[in-house]
Image (spheres, rainbow, N blue to C red):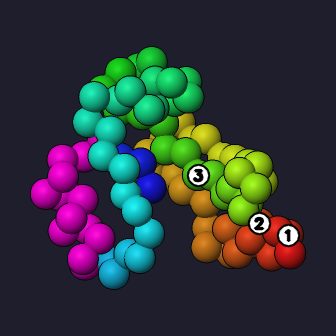
């Protein structure tokens, strides 16, 4: 997970959701900018992006949404993960 949110907020999120994966703090949007994910309409907010990367580092699923309220469903992500096998 990569997020422009503050460290305190992300720590709270990791704890509340019991996330067991790393969270990269991107408050200066350097990572989001380098991947071209900056929202032109609101440049301080990157486009919500979901990636599934295999063990070899190859992107197997990519989805970029323009509306932060729209995200892939759990079913869609599970199908993408199933295709990795």
Q: Callout 2: 10 Å neighbours few (<14), some, many (20+)? A: some
Circle 3 is placed at which residue position?
50
Q: Distance between the residues labelled 2 and 1?
A: 5 Å
Residue 72 at what x, y percent from top left? 61, 60
Point 41% across, 48% down: residue: 2
Q: Is mark 3 on a helix, strand or loop?
A: strand
Q: How far apart are marks 1 and 3 (CA)?
A: 16 Å
Q: What element carries label 2?
A: helix
Labelled disc at residue 15: none
| Nearer to us in this view, 72 or 8 | 8
Circle 2 is placed at which residue position?
80
Indicate whether 6 appears above or below 72: above
Circle 1 is placed at which residue position?
83
> For the view shown, which residue lies furthest in the top direction?
40
The answer to whether 12 appears left or right of 61 in the picture is left
Q: Are marks 2 and 3 in contact (CB under 8 Å)?
A: no
Q: Callout 1: 10 Å neighbours few (<14), some, many (20+)? A: few
Residue 34 at what x, y percent from top left? 51, 24
Q: Give the range drawn in magenta.
A: 4-16
Residue 21 at what x, y percent from top left? 44, 69
Q: Are marks 2 and 1 in contact (CB under 8 Å)?
A: yes
Point 68% across, 56% down: residue: 53
Q: Are marks 1 and 3 in contact (CB under 8 Å)?
A: no
| Nearer to us in this view, 70 or 6 | 6
Q: Distance between the residues labelled 2 and 3?
A: 11 Å
């Amino acid at each position: 997970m990569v997020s422009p949110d503050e460290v305190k907020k992300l720590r709270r999120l990791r704890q509340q959701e019991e996330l067991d994966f790393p969270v990269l703090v991107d408050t200066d949007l350097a990572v989001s900018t380098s991947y071209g994910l900056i929202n032109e309409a609101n440049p301080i907010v990157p486009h919500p992006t979901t990636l599934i990367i295999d063990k070899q580092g190859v992107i197997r699923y990519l989805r970029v949404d323009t509306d932060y309220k729209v995200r892939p469903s759990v079913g869609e992500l599970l199908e993408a993960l199933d295709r990795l096998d």
